[in-house]
Amino acid sequence: MKDQHGKKEPTQPGHRGETGGDATATFIIVLALRSRGEGGETQWRWRVRSMETGEERQFLHVADVLAYVATQTGVPLPG
């Protein structure tokens, strides 16, 4: 679907795109490696933002990131 200026509008959850494909959910996932001082342990920190809702969550483990996305989309984790 295009807006009044002819630009394609983002697909919303539950809506089909112009090609008639499945509904789409988009997330921005950022990984930051944080050091705890000199010689300290490095921590992985994940930040996930839903482009449809704007909700942002933070996680320490990638398994939690995947579980969150699965919950938000209703799509089971790949097996």
Image: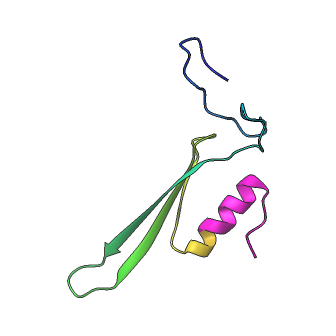
- Front residue of 40/76: it is 76
Q: Is residue 17 above or below residue 6?
A: below
Looking at this view, name the residue that lies furthest to the top.
4
Q: Is residue 38 above or below residue 58?
A: below
Q: Is residue 31 above or below residue 43?
A: above
Q: Which image quadrant for residue 35?
A: bottom left
Residue 24 image point, x, y percent? 70, 45
Q: Quadrant of the C terminus?
A: bottom right
Residue 69 image point, x, y percent? 67, 59
Q: Quadrant of the N terminus?
A: top right
Task: Determine whether, in the image, residue 17 is placed left or right of residue 40.
Answer: right
- Residue sitting at 48 percent across and 65 percent down? 46
Highlighted magenta segment, given as a residue range: 65-79
**Residue 26 lies in the magenta stretch:** no
- Front residue of 68/79: it is 79
- Residue sitting at 60 percent across and 66 percent down? 65
Looking at this view, name the residue that lies furthest to the left.
38
Residue 29 image point, x, y percent? 51, 58
Q: Is residue 46 above or below residue 56?
A: below
Residue 36 image point, x, y percent? 29, 78
- Residue sitting at 20 percent across and 83 percent down? 38
Q: Which image quadrant for residue 64?
A: bottom right
